[in-house]
Image: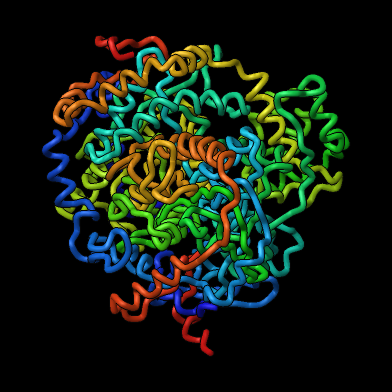
């Protein structure tokens, strides 16, 4: 096999090069002490210590949910949580990432519910209705979502409320890992958001009409015309485009030239 | 330390001093004038990183030999395979499928769903988890001409003009024609679009658009799309098998030179697997993590250009791979957010870009490359940038204008993810502006495809950021999410047709890899690297020094 070490010089990029005189702090990665410069995120601190991520690292921007992390400060009984790519490493942090959590996710057919969306939720996730209301999920969520509240909304049948409240979820799984009622909140919420998007949020009528127009082949003809044009002529059309005003209400504004709509 | 430093707070006062007058003008629809077509070209030539001569060189091997590329991309393409081809037993088959999808972001997942609907058995191989991709990071929206005052005709003009007329017209036509179909498909899958109470889609402008056609889902449109598509793929797991942490490292061809599968590498057990498939889709995303010219990047950890490497060795030509998109608004403060994307939606909602004196110096919604050139010019040429405590240079993005223009609470509602990301460091972006500078965002070019995502190799498809030609040398906001879904779905449909009319090929080979390795030796390339690199290496020097033996 090719030597893995050889490719190491190919990229540099995100490597942390601490400024001279940077203050070093002690952190404990899975219990082992490392000295790292202060102000780094946990993720960059772990890399600075010499770890190469395979699991537990994704977008590095707080949206993919790969790097859910639990930590404690030495001498403090409280267990805390955050995303490794978004949480700043601080002195005496004892860190453990949760790169995977086994989630309960029953399959379903979005186009063929056995009952109402709420009944379907009850069928798929009966454990949601056994929430004990302890609030650990809410305290654990690194996105500051009130998880317990959206679970309460689900129980009540307010799927719109639950969909909106859970919208910021990055599906890291930290909530489910701490739930004494063994609920997989983030998967139930995913189901509820899709059920809401499909059955409760009103459909876009203008989109339906436009889809029919596209399927009729109407625009292919217009586009064929553009493709056949000389570049100078296309440039002229581009420069002369009429710009829709920024504050125009959707669906109300119409351009002067309507031939190519 | 949190929030802005006292020195930066002093500078913010200059922004605040001009804000009321700027908001007043914006209300009247008065803009800072946009550049003319000639000025655009001139500013790009002078200030855009793509046009800098240093850090670029001619490629010495392969179908694009002679093309001038950034050093980082050239070195990657001139690297040898990770595989010792002689120790791989190709008579052994570990998995079979009608379609092998390499990459499980938006394009790969859309393709898998389309192929499954057409009756195919699909294997999806991915380097990290299902959904780990740049798709999940796209924030501001997805374009599509769905409103009455708009049509694919005008969308086409915006795309091709934004790309400086270097795009493949057929690909632009496919992109814009299919856009309403894609938005409709997503709506049917239960995606939570931003809508008015009657169901009408909320739309807004992006840089370089003549119509408001940016559809969104808060400021996490890509994340919402990815969540929905992944969830749907999981509902169909009888036919769509996802192999996580198992990136492809080489494409397999059959005796006729048609696509025949791939060799996968299990990152955890370090085993190699042979997958045989009737058709193969490369949907591995872009090259942001190569950190071209040392720029920080907005990209996902896995964006290491694996797909172009594999395809190039198999003999596929690349288009515009020398062209890189720098997003004009990457965060440069606080340090923890450096490189982080600040969605164009912020400017779409009316936030202006200002220099250290709190003055506007460009139209805030130029095409991305032009806008980036404007910011670089203001900082390096005019010397009116703001310097951060860690020595980074940038300009202000005046987000507090948004609530003033659209009402209290708009920032919190329309930009929830961004709001949280800054709030963590005690900066309230609805009250204080952000500091930004261009950041490496997108691989404009890539694998040459036709409008059905076919490559020059039979049975080999490519879609998404890894493919080229759709956006030419510059992409507009909201067309990348659209691109991955349009061409992902088209690839899935075409692959279905192809797989139904073809039997599994005969003997699989890696002889193209051997040939390519030889070509590197013959070209006299000294100390070639090994690629695909799969993951970037961010170990600091003091660690590397001890990683001996």
Specify whether residue A65 is in view. Answer: no
Residue B280 position, x and y percent, is: 53, 50
Whether residue B75 sits left or right of residue A185 in the image: it is left
Q: Which residue lies at the image location 24% right of the left edge and 59% below the top edge?
A: B67
Is B61 situated above or below B331?
below
Viewed as shown, does residue A184 lie left or right of A167? Answer: right
Q: Nearer the viewer, residue B4 or B88?
A: B88
Residue at position x 40%, y 22% from top? B145
Task: Give how far across and how far down residue B436 sits, in percent.
Answer: 34, 48
- Relative image position of residue B170 (x, y in whole percent): 33, 33
Tell me which residue sits at (45%, 44%) in the image: B464
Q: With B443 as the anchor, is A164 left or right in this view?
A: right
Q: Quadrant of residue A203?
A: top right
Is B247 situated above or below B39? below
Q: Quadrant of residue B388?
A: bottom left
Residue A202 seen in the current view: yes
- In percent of the image, x 11 and y 38: which residue is there? B38
- Which residue ends up furthest to the bottom in the rendered image? B549
Q: Position of residue B431 (x, y in %)?
A: 42, 37
Viewer-side residue, A192 vs B352: A192
Q: Nearer the viewer, residue B334 or B89?
A: B89
């Amino acid at each position: 096999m090719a030597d893995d070490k050889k490719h190491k010089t190919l990229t540099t990029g995100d490597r942390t090069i601490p400024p001279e005189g940077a203050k070093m702090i002690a952190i404990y990665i899975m219990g082992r002490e490392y000295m790292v410069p202060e102000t780094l995120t946990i993720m960059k601190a772990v890399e600075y210590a010499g770890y190469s991520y395979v699991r537990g690292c994704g977008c590095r921007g707080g949206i993919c949910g790969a790097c859910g992390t639990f930590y404690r400060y030495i001498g403090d009984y409280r267990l805390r949580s955050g995303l490794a790519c978004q949480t700043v490493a601080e002195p005496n942090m004892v860190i453990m990432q949760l790169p995977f959590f086994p989630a309960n996710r029953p399959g379903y057919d979005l186009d063929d519910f056995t009952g109402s969306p709420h009944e379907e939720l009850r069928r798929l996730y009966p454990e949601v209705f056994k929430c004990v209301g302890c609030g650990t999920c809410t305290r654990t969520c690194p996105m500051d979502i009130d998880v317990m509240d959206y679970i309460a909304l689900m129980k009540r049948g307010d799927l719109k409320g639950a969909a909106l409240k859970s919208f910021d979820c990055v599906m890291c799984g930290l909530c489910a890992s701490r739930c004494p009622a063994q609920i997989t909140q983030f998967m139930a919420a995913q189901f509820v958001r899709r059920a809401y998007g499909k059955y409760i949020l009103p459909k876009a009528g203008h989109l339906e009409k436009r889809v029919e127009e596209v399927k009729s082949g109407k625009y292919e003809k217009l586009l064929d015309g553009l493709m056949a044009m000389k570049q100078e002529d296309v440039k002229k059309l581009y420069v002369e485009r009429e710009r829709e005003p920024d504050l125009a209400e959707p669906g109300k504004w119409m351009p002067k030239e309507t031939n190519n709509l | 330390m949190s929030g802005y430093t006292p020195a930066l707070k002093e500078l913010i006062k200059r922004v605040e001093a001009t804000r009321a007058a700027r908001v007043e003008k914006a209300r009247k629809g008065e803009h800072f004038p946009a550049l003319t077509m000639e000025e655009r070209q001139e500013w790009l030539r002078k200030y855009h990183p793509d046009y800098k001569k240093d850090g670029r060189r001619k490629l010495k091997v392969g179908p694009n030999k002679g093309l001038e590329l950034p050093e980082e991309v050239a070195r990657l393409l001139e690297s040898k395979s990770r595989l010792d081809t002689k120790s791989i037993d190709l008579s052994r088959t570990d998995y079979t499928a009608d379609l092998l999808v390499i990459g499980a972001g938006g394009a790969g997942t859309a393709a898998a769903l389309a192929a499954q609907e057409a009756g195919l058995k699909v294997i999806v191989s991915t380097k990290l988890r299902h959904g780990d991709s740049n798709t999940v990071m796209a924030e501001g929206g997805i374009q599509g001409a769905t409103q009455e005052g708009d049509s694919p005709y005008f969308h086409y003009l915006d795309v091709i003009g934004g790309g400086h007329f270097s795009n493949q017209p057929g690909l632009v036509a496919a992109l814009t024609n299919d856009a309403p179909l894609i938005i409709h498909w997503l709506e049917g899958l239960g995606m939570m679009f931003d809508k008015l109470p009657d169901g009408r889609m909320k739309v807004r402008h992006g840089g370089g658009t003549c119509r408001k056609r940016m559809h969104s889902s808060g400021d996490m449109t890509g994340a919402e799309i990815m969540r929905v598509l992944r969830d749907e793929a999981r509902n169909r797991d009888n036919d769509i098998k996802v192999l996580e942490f198992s990136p492809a490292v080489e494409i397999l061809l059959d005796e006729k030179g048609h696509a025949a599968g791939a060799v996968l590498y299990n990152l955890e057990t370090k085993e190699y697997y042979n997958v045989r498939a009737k058709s193969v889709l490369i949907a591995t995303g872009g090259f942001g993590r190569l950190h071209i010219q040392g720029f920080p990047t907005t990209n996902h950890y896995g964006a290491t250009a694996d797909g172009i490497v594999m395809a190039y060795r198999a003999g596929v030509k690349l288009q515009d791979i020398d062209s890189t998109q720098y997003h004009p608004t990457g965060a440069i403060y606080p340090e923890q957010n450096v490189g982080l994307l600040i969605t164009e939606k912020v400017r779409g909602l009316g936030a202006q870009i200002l220099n250290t004196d709190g003055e506007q110096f460009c139209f805030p919604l130029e095409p991305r490359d032009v806008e980036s050139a404007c910011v670089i010019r203001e900082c390096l040429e005019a010397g009116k940038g703001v310097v951060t405590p860690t020595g980074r240079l940038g300009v202000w993005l005046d987000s507090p204008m948004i609530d003033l223009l659209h009402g209290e609470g708009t920032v919190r509602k329309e930009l929830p993810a961004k709001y949280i990301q800054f709030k963590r460091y005690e900066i309230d972006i609805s009250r204080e502006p952000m500091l930004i500078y261009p950041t490496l965002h997108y691989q404009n070019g890539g694998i040459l495809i036709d409008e059905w995502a076919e490559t020059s190799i039979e049975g080999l498809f490519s879609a998404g950021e890894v493919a080229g030609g759709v956006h030419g040398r510059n992409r507009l906001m909201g067309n990348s999410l659209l691109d991955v879904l349009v061409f992902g779905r088209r690839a899935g449909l075409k692959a279905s047709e192809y797989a139904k009319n073809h039997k599994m090929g005969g003997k699989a080979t890696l002889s193209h890899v051997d040939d390519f390795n030889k070509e590197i030796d013959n070209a006299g390339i000294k100390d070639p690297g090994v690629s695909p690199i799969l993951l970037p290496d961010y170990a600091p020097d003091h660690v590397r020094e001890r990683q001996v033996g």
